Amino acid sequence: MRVRESLPRDLLRLFVWYPLRLVAERLPPRAAVALYRAMGRLHAALSRGRAGRIAAAARAVDPALAEAGAEQAVLDAFATHYVNQLIVFQLPRRTAANFLGLPESDGLDRLGLALAHGRGAVIPIGHFGPTQLPLAALGTLGFPMVQIGHLSDEGLSFVGRRVAFRLRARYEARIPARIVPPGPGVRQALAQLRAGGVVMTTADDGPGQPPFGHHATVEFPGGALSVPLGPARLALSAGAALVPGFLEPGHDAPFRFVLDAPIAPPRDTDRDAAALAMTREFMARYADRVASRPGWWHGLESHLFP
C-alpha cells in the first residue's frame, strides 16, 4: 500500500539528490556535517508546529528537561534527521587514513580482543545519531563487517522510489560492508560470526520499521519500549561476543563512536533468559545516552514527518 506524500517533500528530495548531493559529496566531512545540521536548524525554524510536538516528546523522555533543553532537543532532532539521511554522501569517499576525522573512536581494542580470541563479535547499536557512520568507519578501518539492515521503498512516492531510494541504494552499496536483510540474512550473519567476523545490527526498531523476530518490553525513557532480542540471540547462537556500540558528541570531531565493555551472558540460564538479560543490560546503557541527549534519538522522528 502506497502512502500519499506531499509535493513539497518530493521537491526537497529532488533538490537534495541532485544539486545538493553533487556539491556536498565533495565537501570535507566536517563541512558537510555542518551543512546538514544547518539545514536541519533552518527546517526547525520553519516548522513551529512540529517543533512543539518534538519538544513535548523530548520532555516525555526527560521530564526534568528545562525550556532551553527542550529547545536544544528540537534543534538536535531536526539536525540529526538531516545528518542521518545525508551523511551517506560522505561515506564512500572515506579511507582508513582520513575516516577518524569524522568520528573519533574509543574501545577498538575491545573489538580486536574479541576477534583475536577467535570469536566473532555482534555490535548492537541504537537508532541514535547517524546510524550508518559506525558501520562505514569499522569497514573502512579493515574490520570484516556485515550489517543486518532493512531497506524498503514501502510508503514512498514515485519520486521517493525512483530518486531517493534508488540513489541511496547505490551509495550504500559502496560502503565497505555487506548489508543483509532481516530474516533470510540471519544465516549469513551466523556464518560471518563463526568465521570470526563482525555483525552490526540495530538494538531498537527505527521509525516506520517493521519489527522482526523475537521482542521484549523494557522500561525506557519516555515509557515502555518493545525491543528486539535478535542481537543477543545471534551472539549466543554463534558463541560470539556482544560488544555494545554508542555514538556520542566528539571532542575534536563531530562524533565519537564508543565500543563499550562486552555484555557476558549470565550463568546457569537457558538461551531465552540469557538473551533477555543481555538485552536489558544493553538497553540500560543505551537509556542513559538517550536521556542525556533526547534529540539524537530517532524515536522522536515520528513528530518530524507525521
Image (cartoon, grey):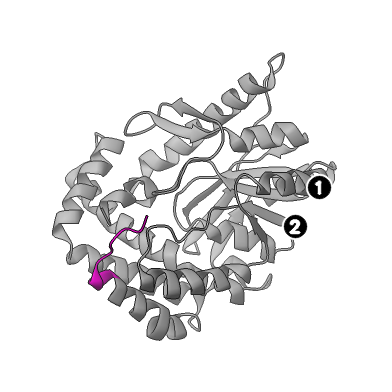
Range of residues picked out in magenta = 1-9
Q: Is residue 2 magenta?
A: yes
Whole-percent x and y of residue 165?
A: 46, 68
Tell me the kind of residue under disc 1: Gly
Q: Secondary structure at mark 1?
A: loop
Secondary structure character of the magenta stretch overall: loop
> What residue sits right under mark 2 in the picture?
144
> What residue sits right under mark 1 in the picture?
196
Q: Is residue 290 magenta?
A: no
Q: Relative to 283, does residue 148 appear above or below in the rendering?
A: below
In the picture, residue 224 is in which quadrant?
top left
**Residue 176 visible from this viewpoint:** yes
Residue for point 81% across, 43% down: 194
Label 2–label 1 contact, CB within 8 A:
yes
In the picture, residue 41 is in which quadrant?
bottom left
Q: On the rendered structure, is 164 left or right of 48?
A: right
User: How far apart, in angstroms, are the residues tagged by discs 2 and 1?
Assistant: 9 Å
Considering every residue shown, the one lying at the far front of the view is 1
